[in-house]
């Protein structure tokens, strides 16, 4: 919620969000994020076009993927015991958007996000983690830092600002295989 509050209404990027949750969990995150900041947050819908200035949230028990400038929802295998998981999202985004991807790993256990962050870094994208010292569970950020030592450590209170800054400066105009702008 803190991250969403820091995102400006004119963000020149889309934000795709994965939260580890039970397959039968309540699906309130899109509404919570929608009320938290200036960007509209919606439940991800299979086949929807990705639009800048929007937050798309993975539903329970479905991986959120990026494919040919569209959202794809998958019931593929669980990663690290989770569906949705960050690794499939990061890998698909790296393949589609290459150097325009900014992968962010937040508080969580185990190592989801680390392998996908490697794919993002190899594609020329950026990787950031929530500052591990402030995490309730620092496993995911620490695993990502171990896999991508150049990842930026950003306090959660600054993540929205960091994403906006990187979207406006570093990632603008970076060549990709496919453009996500519509």
Image (cartoon, helix red, strand yellow):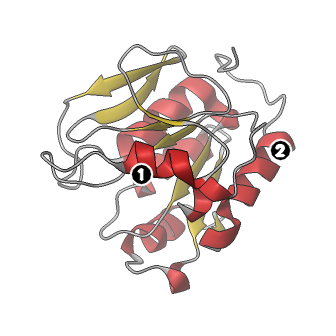
Number of the label disc, if any, that sits on residue 23: none
Residue at the front extreme, as displayed? 35
Closest to the observer: 127 or 156?
A: 156
> Is label 1 in a helix, a strand or a loop?
helix
Residue at the left extreme, as displayed? 24
Q: Which residue is mark 1?
A: 115
- Which percent across, then down, holds residue 77? 17, 37
Q: Quadrant of residue 75?
A: top left
- Which percent across, then down, holds residue 175? 77, 24
Give the side of residue 114 with respect to residue 145, left or right: left
Closest to the observer: 133 or 121?
A: 133
The tag earlier along the polypeptide, 1 or 2, is: 1
Q: Looking at the picture, does residue 2 appear above or below residue 99? A: below
Number of the label disc, if any, that sits on residue 170: 2
State whether residue 154 appears in this view.
no
Near mark 1 (Cα within 10 A), the count class, few <14, some 14-19 or many ≥20, is some
**Mark 1 and mark 2 residues within 8 Å of each other at the beta carbon:** no
> Is label 2 in a helix, a strand or a loop?
loop
State whether residue 180 appears in this view.
yes
Which residue sits at x=29%, y=55%?
20
Which residue sits at x=81%, y=51%?
165
Which residue sits at x=58%, y=37%?
40
Q: How many marks?
A: 2
The quarter of the picture where the C terminus appears is: top right
- Which percent across, then down, holds residue 166? 78, 49
- Which percent across, then down, holds residue 156? 60, 70
Near mark 2 (Cα within 10 A), the count class, few <14, some 14-19 or many ≥20, is few
Which residue sits at x=36%, y=38%?
58
Give the side of residue 21 with respect to residue 105, left or right: left
For the residues labelled 1 and 2, the Cα–Cα distance comes to 23 Å
């Amino acid at each position: 919620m803190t991250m969403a509050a820091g995102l400006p209404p004119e963000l020149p990027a889309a934000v795709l969000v994965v939260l580890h949750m039970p397959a039968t969990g309540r699906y309130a995150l899109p509404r919570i994020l929608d009320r938290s900041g200036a960007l509209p947050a919606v439940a991800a819908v299979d086949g929807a076009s990705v639009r800048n200035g929007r937050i798309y949230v993975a539903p329970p028990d479905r991986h959120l993927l990026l494919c040919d400038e569209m959202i794809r929802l998958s019931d593929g295998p669980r990663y690290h015991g989770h569906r949705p998981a960050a690794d499939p999202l990061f890998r698909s985004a790296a393949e589609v958007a290459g150097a325009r991807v900014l992968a962010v790993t937040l508080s969580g256990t185990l190592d989801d996000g680390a392998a996908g962050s490697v794919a993002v870094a190899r594609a020329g994208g950026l990787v950031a983690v929530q500052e591990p010292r402030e995490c309730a569970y620092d496993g995911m950020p620490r695993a990502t830092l171990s896999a991508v030592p150049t990842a930026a450590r950003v306090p959660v209170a600054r993540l929205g600002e960091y994403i906006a800054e990187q979207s406006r400066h570093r990632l603008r105009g970076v060549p990709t295989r496919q453009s996500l702008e519509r």
